[in-house]
Amino acid sequence: NNSITTASQTLSPTATNVYIVTAINTNGCNVKRQITVNVLQGTCMSTASNITATACGSYILNGTTYTVSGGYTQTVTNIGGCDSTISLSLTVNPLPTITSSLSTSSICSGLPITMTASGGETYSWSNFVNSVSQTVTPIITTSYTISGTDVNGCLNTAVTTVLVNSLPTLTILANPTNICKGTTSNISITGAANYNWSNSVSAASQTVSPLATIIYIVTGTDANGCINTAT
């Protein structure tokens, strides 16, 4: 009904309008269809808004990520095709650099070690401790996550791993295990680097001639300085 005879057209009405199209097939039969194009009135007035924001590390506005403090302007289009201007005044605070130091580089299983965090104001550890430092006694190598929050309320995390050396496995042998009074037995130990027997002998083996049944205790120390005992 607007005198266009093509199969498609581009419209730019200034008000809501109903368009009627008449189609004629090869047999000369025609059919009419109509479509309504709604024009939203008064919604395309220029609008402006101001946003003041403070963020940690980055700030996202309408899909755009900002990592540097400053002033920014965005123009967004609403569902009616109208533009709005957003002015953003942004302060981006850096994330804190959280670190953790250990009182020693490694420990033997069952011994304590102290972990101390730095870089934040408050801390929370993955084992539910909320202090700057703590002493732990892991029996195997264990990793701990520390979350630190700075004065700006920004949070970051770090992971510290406590290396735990297992205790030496000592094997003690007596040959023979049963002796007659006045005879001898050779007792020996393996599994460590250095040894100290309860009778003040520091060798890996010794020959003994006890006058009565006796228990010998030997302490073994490995290359990591870890200690275990056997009898």
Image (spheres, rainbow, N blue to C red):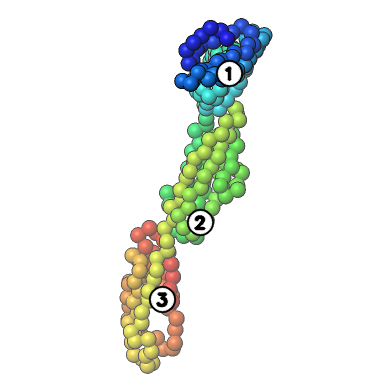
Residue 87 horizontal/vertical position (percent): 59, 13
**Nearer mark to the viewer, of 3 and 1:** 1
- Sequence-wise, the earlier of marks 3 and 2 is 2
Q: Which residue is pictured at 50% across the width and 18% down the height?
A: 28
> Label for residue 32?
1
The reply to whether callout 3 and callout 2 are in contact (CB within 8 Å) is: no
Mark 1 vs mark 2: give the one in front: 1
Q: Residue 30 at x, y = what percent?
A: 54, 18
Q: Amino acid at mark 3?
A: Asn
Q: Residue at point 43% right, 67% down?
A: 228
User: What is the crowding at mark 1: few (fewer than 14 residues within 10 Å), some, or many (at least 20)?
Assistant: few
Q: Residue at x 33, y 65 (%)?
A: 193
- Figure check: 60 above or below 143: above
Spatial distance from mark 1 to mark 2, Cα to Cα? 83 Å
Mark 2, Cα crowd under 10 Å, few <14 / some 14-19 / many 20+, is: some
Residue that label 3 marks? 199
Q: Which mark is residue 138?
A: 2
Counting residues from the N terminus, which is met first, the one under dot 1 or under dot 2?
Answer: 1
